[in-house]
Image: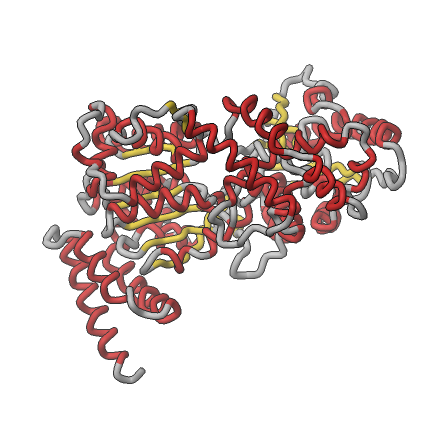
Amino acid sequence: MNIEAPQITLFEDSHIEHCKNVLKKEAQIEDVVRALRDNVGDKHRTEQTEVVTEIAKRERKVFKTRAAAAIDRHLDATEDGTKASELAINKGLLNFVSLITPNIRLRARAGSGKSTALVIKCDFLINELGVAPEAIQLLTFNRSASNDLSKKLRKALGDKVGKRVGVNTFHSLAYHILNCCPQTQHLKLIFKEEDRSQKEQLSDLEAIVVKETTARDFAAYRERYEGTSYSYMTRFENFDQSIRDFVTGATALYRARRGTPTPLKHNPVTRHLERVVAAYEARLRQSSTLDGEAGLREAARILESDVDLANLNRIDEGIQPLFTRLGGGMQFLFVDEFQDFSAAFAEITQGVMARNPNCVMNAVGDDWQSINAFMGADLSFFNGMKKTHVASLNLPLHSNWRCGKRIVELGNRVMGASKATAAVPALPHDGKIRVRVGDIQNFKRKKEEWHAEAQDFLEGHINNMAQAAWADDLRAGRERGTVVLLAAQNSPFSKSLQAYAKMIDTTEGGKVTTSTSHASKGGEWDHVILLDGTASHYPSAHPAEPAQRDMIKRADLEEEGQRLLYVAVTRAKYTLSILAPTELHPKLNAALEIARR
């Protein structure tokens, strides 16, 4: 070790000199990146992290002033004149923006402004370091996120420059590749922007499930669920049809989880799903069709091949910059919602990076907001970035600019946060939490009976909670804010969210909307009323239930339910009202204490 230390120091010195030359436009970023990866690529992961961490400390100092200038262009100074870049609360942002050579996994907690962080870093790279906008690519999971980032980039950089930065969903990227490559351009593509399923092929899939599910399979399912919490299914008169229905839903999950580091179980259920999926995908091939999942995998295969993407004949002028980037012209790749990666998204990303070996990847996400296991998302990709991408660092962005202090505290306590992982309140107001628990007994009772009691309980509190929130607005000198009703399902306790919303009196103003807790991710409202803060709703019913128990561990589902609660409570800016008709979810017990303050 005594021999190695001087060698590391010599490389660090050389690296920093090259970074200084980048500032002076006397060195290329990609050359510095290549040298870093060559130096650490053959080291053990622990040693690699140590070297990259030490280099990053010094590299930040080189670019700190320029990174601060970019931050201060976008974020306001405080009333006393302190620049945003000088605030301790923005240290994580400054650390992220001022690094250009390591790959980065940025853990961005709820309300931390990850979109703002991405826009500021693009500004820094383009306006401070001279990186060509065309050399930057952002990848998102859905069209709304893509459109939002595009608008923010154009506003921040100016329309001419902002629109030159590449912004695509993963699926649109795959679509363009498949539609332009000679070996796939004849195929029928039944996806484009963000389709992760086989919606347009559902009738074909249902027919395949009928064909591929035999009496032996039904017997295996019956045996599998006897003696479990799903034994009630075995008593259904329409047991066979119930099996067909959830198998149809489970195929999407099975396909998405193939290639996940955690292997699937091998038992009669997964073997049956494998047979159904094989028959379905054979039907796709026979009809020369690719759906979203197959399209992602095929596009990844092309990216890993030697196809010359930069010089394809069939490329529209509008997407030529995308293919120039894919063909080797990419210097920076930004990935949004990294916590939602499944194997197919990981394969696409690896293919892009393989085409651009000196490209720097910044992946942004929040492990506390990973709630899409039913779509194949697996946190092993988020947690294992250092294993898959050489010269990588894990950085935090934990300042919450959305929620009042008490709401941030509750979110941390829901997740059992340590000092190192906790979100940090960045706003001065405390926020308000209110809790009502009904203690309605639901054990061994007919759903119709206790659901009626739960509805009565909610009807007795919803309007009061909304009016109390608006009274808080009045006392604080704010206009009546937005109220959202959240629940794990669209019809909590057998009544629609919209029906509950109509119970709120808005004659004096105020806007009320509804959302499932899943769909609320990425959103924010002044006031949140959670209608189902109960243990039985988080984790919520899975679309592939009960087949998901053979693809996702029960402990993982419980943790995802915990994370879904975190998402729900951190949508609130000023007040959070929690209603629990039955028992309060144990992860929300801290809300009772905080509410008394």
Residue beneath the point at 37% across and 59% down:
393
Q: Is residue 529 visible?
A: no
Up-down relation of residue 521 to residue 226 (above or below)? above
Q: Residue furthest bottom?
A: 2
Q: Is residue 296 visible?
A: yes
Q: Where residue 406 sits in the image (x, y, percent)?
A: 63, 47
Q: Residue furthest left?
A: 26
The answer to which quarter of the image holds residue 387 is bottom left
Image position of 231 (left or right of 489): right
Residue beneath the point at 31% across and 69% down:
43
Residue beneath the point at 49% across and 45% down:
258
Q: Where residue 358 sits in the image (x, y, percent)?
A: 23, 52
Q: Where residue 401 sits in the image (x, y, percent)?
A: 49, 43
| Quadrant showing the N terminus | bottom left
Image position of 227 (left or right of 301): right
Q: Residue furthest top?
A: 507
Residue beneath the point at 29% across and 45% down:
304
Up-down relation of residue 24 to residue 187 (above or below)? below
The chosen color scheme is: secondary structure
Up-down relation of residue 358 to residue 180 (above or below)? below
The answer to which quarter of the image holds residue 577 is top right
Image position of 547 (left or right of 458): left
Q: Where residue 188 sits in the image (x, y, percent)?
A: 38, 23
Total marks placed: 0
Residue nearest the observer in this picture, 475 or 243: 243
Residue nearest the observer in this picture, 299 or 158: 299
Residue nearest the observer in this picture, 356 or 249: 249
